[in-house]
Image: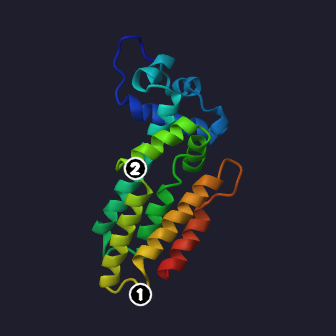
């Protein structure tokens, strides 16, 4: 437990990582402000000192993880001509499922205030599925220009299919359901001819 009055470094990430561990281990129903702070080894008040409430915490966790995946998707352009197209694209698609992604997304959907906050942030330009879709489209266009993707492949349609499938799998997966990663891997391979 952190002593009172001592600054906790990287508190947001510490709390987010703790929430992911709780969800992965115990499921989304076990996620409370108390379970997060206990897992993080800090006082319960720390979460409320940094977030207006638990719904804001859940929304910010989801938005942070979307932004991370969007940043990874934007790095795809630097991989043009390297490795395999399937593996490069697969890494971004599978990143959406890291760290309890399905359970945390499902949790956000059960909390109307968190859902509204996420929607508002995305409408305001926060990185989300649209940014990921745009990055995948640009990457596939570049790879098609190099001849590493068939000329018949429509990058925008492939990007929409990948993002749409990821969204579907995130919303319909939770602890105890089959791992969504193999389905995503098969889809990426089928779409880019891998």
Q: Is residue 177 left or right of residue 3?
A: right
Q: Kindly report the distance in space between the C-alpha atoms of the residues bearing marks 2 and 1.
A: 34 Å
Percent across and percent down for residue 60 are 44, 38
Instruction: Find numbered disc 1 in the image and state the secondary structure of the residue it sits on.
Output: loop
Residue 188 appears in the rendering: yes
Residue farthest toward the top in the current orientation of the protein? 4
Percent across and percent down for residue 43 are 48, 17
Q: Is residue 173 left or right of residue 86?
A: right
Which colouring convention does the figure follow? rainbow
Vertical relation: 23 (above or below) 86: above
Vertical relation: 91 (above or below) 109: below
Residue drawn at (35%, 82%) of the image = 144
Percent across and percent down for residue 57 are 48, 32
Residue 86 appears in the rendering: no
Residue drawn at (40%, 44%) of the image = 121
Residue drawn at (55%, 69%) of the image = 185
For the residue pair 72 and 83, the one nearer the viewer reads as 72
Q: Is residue 5 left or right of residue 90?
A: left
Say the numbered circle drawn on residue 161.
none
Percent across and percent down for residue 188 are 51, 72
Vertical relation: 27 (above or below) 130: above
Q: Is residue 174 left or right of residue 46?
A: right
Vertical relation: 13 (above or below) 74: above
Give the number of the mark in front: 2 or 1.
Answer: 2
Q: Which residue is mark 2?
A: 123
**Does label 2 or label 1 sit earlier along the sequence?**
2
Instruction: Find numbered disc 2 in the image and state the secondary structure of the residue it sits on.
Output: helix
Q: Which residue is mark 1?
A: 150
Q: Residues within 10 Å of mark 2 (few under 14, many from 20)?
A: few
Residue drawn at (59%, 37%) of the image = 111
Q: Residues within 10 Å of mark 1 (few under 14, many from 20)?
A: some
Q: Tell whether label 1 touches label 2 (CB within 8 Å).
A: no
């Amino acid at each position: 437990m952190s002593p009172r009055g001592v600054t906790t470094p990287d508190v947001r990430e510490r709390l987010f990582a703790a929430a992911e561990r709780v969800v992965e281990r115990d499921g989304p129903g076990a996620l409370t402000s108390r379970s997060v702070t206990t897992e993080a080894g800090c006082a319960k008040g720390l979460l409320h000192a940094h977030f207006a409430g638990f719904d804001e915490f859940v929304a910010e966790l989801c938005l942070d993880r979307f932004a991370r995946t969007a940043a990874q998707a934007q790095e795809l352009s630097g991989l043009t001509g390297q490795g395999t197209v399937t593996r490069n694209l697969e890494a971004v698609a599978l990143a959406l499922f890291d760290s309890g992604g399905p359970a945390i997304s499902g949790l956000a959907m059960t909390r109307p205030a968190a859902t509204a906050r996420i929607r508002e942030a995305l409408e305001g330009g926060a990185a989300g599925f649209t940014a990921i879709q745009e990055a995948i489209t640009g990457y596939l266009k570049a790879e098609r220009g190099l001849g590493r993707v068939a000329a018949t492949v429509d990058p925008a349609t492939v990007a929409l299919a990948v993002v749409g499938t990821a969204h579907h799998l995130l919303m319909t997966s939770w602890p105890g359901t089959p791992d969504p990663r193999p389905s995503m891997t098969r889809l990426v391979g089928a779409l880019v001819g891998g």
